[in-house]
Amino acid sequence: MANRYINPSGFTENLPHQQVVEDELKDSFAKVAESYGYARLETASVEYLETLASKGEINKEVYTIGRALSEGVNTESERALHFDLTVPFARYVAQHQADLPFPFRRYQIQKVWRGERPQKGRFREFYQADVDVVSRDNLSIYFDAEVATVMAQILTSFKLGKVTMHINNRKFLSGLFYEVFKTDITTPVLQTIDRIDKIGVEEVKRILREQICLPSASVEKLFDVIGRIVPLEEVSDFLSNLPTSNDALKEGIEELSQVFSVLAENKELKDFSFVLNPTIARGLDYYTGTVYETTIEGLEKYGSICSGGRYADLAGRFTKQKLPGVGMSIGLTRLLAILGEENLADFSRKSRSDLVVFLRDHQQSVLAIRAANMLRGQGLNIEVNYKEGVALSKQLATLEKQSIPHGLVCEADGKLTMYTLRDGEQANKQTFANILDIATYIHSAKVTRR
Amino acid sequence: MANRYINPSGFTENLPHQQVVEDELKDSFAKVAESYGYARLETASVEYLETLASKGEINKEVYTIGRALSEGVNTESERALHFDLTVPFARYVAQHQADLPFPFRRYQIQKVWRGERPQKGRFREFYQADVDVVSRDNLSIYFDAEVATVMAQILTSFKLGKVTMHINNRKFLSGLFYEVFKTDITTPVLQTIDRIDKIGVEEVKRILREQICLPSASVEKLFDVIGRIVPLEEVSDFLSNLPTSNDALKEGIEELSQVFSVLAENKELKDFSFVLNPTIARGLDYYTGTVYETTIEGLEKYGSICSGGRYADLAGRFTKQKLPGVGMSIGLTRLLAILGEENLADFSRKSRSDLVVFLRDHQQSVLAIRAANMLRGQGLNIEVNYKEGVALSKQLATLEKQSIPHGLVCEADGKLTMYTLRDGEQANKQTFANILDIATYIHSAKVTRR
């Protein structure tokens, strides 16, 4: 019995020190998205199975819901938990379009559920975080740059080290292909090129030659153009030297030029690069223009941590209204796991507390509560430890264990003694006469730590 | 077919103008809770059915999950969506106690699912927001005051009008009952007294006399004491005049005295009152000491919007470790519905945007993007409207429709023209030479609006 009182495997949940980091990711994501006018959206977790059926087929990874006590037979199995945020977003926009402002900029940070076999990097319950903008009939190419900018700002706020966003355009890639082979690009070709970061350029060329039977010289000619990654500052030159012999190529070049010229405005982004990577294809049929993938330098083994693209119609299955859009997505739970494995964040804190007020004895409790309230009034997070008579050394050990930077004792004579943890050193002791001076000190210490 | 492409009934989701208000509630909740050192916790949404079974019985409202394509038979029905936050919290603390700091202060804002018949005020998917603190073996009575203070601060930040928190103590009520009747209080008596706000004091007395067969004179004697609501400033006098003839009564009086003496420190709380209401019983056996209910003045018909209490042991079913705690809970989705019905919040905004930059023509796009970036750098939420050549009157109408307070046009000569909406008036037009002056203006206008 008792061993079943744990959470079922694959349905992730955090320990407090992981939760603190996850919250920082979510808060940063929301703050940046809102600074660009993106509104938070939360759809219901449960959809009709029909809604989740792509092209009429239900994925076996979908979790349906039913009522307990129905003796094994799931009588309400036509309802299910969503497995991504895109399908519910499409349904939501189609259903509520009369109440939405267009262009509709939204972000969504929600759990999704998939009945996968639990393994490293695969979860049954996890967070996704999406940014999309959709409009009616048409949507300016400026949004392709805006969405990339929002995600770049978000990823920069995550402090992941050096990050590169690889941008391409489906029309551009198709146009180049047509220019070389005088025939339309096919899904197998796209999917082969898409595997370049996994199998390498030579293997891709071999498959194109030997399995898809494209002429060797033409394959080389294609890779002369698409085989290099073009830094942002060289994109304009690179594109202006290409032919514009077919409409797709011409449009692709125009769109990429516009996107990169806007992205050039993001000069202040530290450790973040935008590049044109003409081999980025993205497997899905769904995308019709700009496509994005994002990698962390040195951690390319994890693949793209943030991907997406432009689509011609969000919700064709749910409404006759044409809804073009562009969006990108981060697998937040997976990113948190990467941060943990690679030790890329501060996982020492168990709460967001700045300071603990210690009680020496019962008489000081009201003093302590007042001091705590005054510090909260200054925007600080303050715990009171109501345990009396605990030795100072033990109190300081608790601070250290939970990575709370400051401890405060209200002395009987009205003096305030503050202890500040220093990395690997003894706690630093300071005396203050005024509680507001403590607030000022802590705020400035916070700025320094960053 | 097409009419099924909506969300299933009872599984709530917001329109953008409702989402903005819900986000404000959640953000305020989190901010206040963290300011008292409460850490955010999110448990998995899915538990083993055994974990959710109270006293071995599965509630028929529980939603189990199963895999699609299992042909009607739910082969994995031993897993289910949680129906509240208390049971998962108990399981979490029992499971992870080696990794938790005690006393463990946590807040939890999560969706829960119940298979109820959808009706007004009842949802199948909704948010709860809980604050609890648990410890090992024993927990200071100060926490009973702290939890009430945290919730009072949260509810004050919600701006609900005049709010009253009714506080009582189970030991106190039981002790008074024993004092009068010389016999222990029973569950039917507790449940009858608990209905006082629904059926009135005379009906409660009648049931106690006629159905529970208590002597009429003694019932009157009991109600002479418990029949009045005692304001915070009179609690000390009220309690000091009572007998302390049995242990429960003595302990109850001591605990209430301590709780109210700490609550008296919350002088700055506007429109919020703490009262001792000796008739508050709370139906559940679970509670052992302090109990809380909270009502909005004039909206008592909605019952308590925030309730909870002290419990002797959180997780006796899951661990041998005794875990006493105290906590309170808000039904956030239900509260949002009340705010909507009673028009108690600003439901006009569809996003948190402060300003929209309008484009007059294509040449200004880079200027507009730069202006937007500079304003974002000043902590403002800025949208750019990339549509060119839209008439100013139409742009201003869009502002008004979405309740975004400011619009900006970057003129060709470098001048910045800002339009500010005024309630029921024309937009106010101002010219600025410097973008930072605009940020200063908007920040000060925000402060004034509050």
Image (spheres, coloured by chain):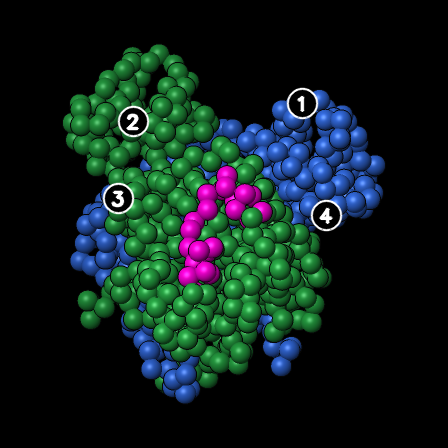
Chain colours: A green, B blue
| Residue depicted at x 61% and y 46% | A258
**First in residue order: circle 4 vs circle 1:** 4
Marks 4, 3 in one chain: no
Label 2 – label 3 distance at C-alpha: 24 Å
Chain on which label 2 sits:
A
| Residue depicted at x 72% and y 47% | B387
- B249 in relation to B231, above or below: below
Label 2 – label 4 distance at C-alpha: 51 Å
Helix, strand or loop at mark 1:
loop
Identify residue for label 1: B434
Identify residue for label 2: A406
Between disc 2 and disc 1, the foreground one is 1
Part of the protein shown in magenta: A219-240
- A245 in relation to B146, above or below: below
- Residue B82's spot in the image, x, y percent? 39, 65
Identify residue for label 4: B387
Q: Are marks 2 and 4 in contact (CB under 8 Å)?
A: no
Chain on which label 3 sits:
A
Label 1 – label 3 distance at C-alpha: 43 Å
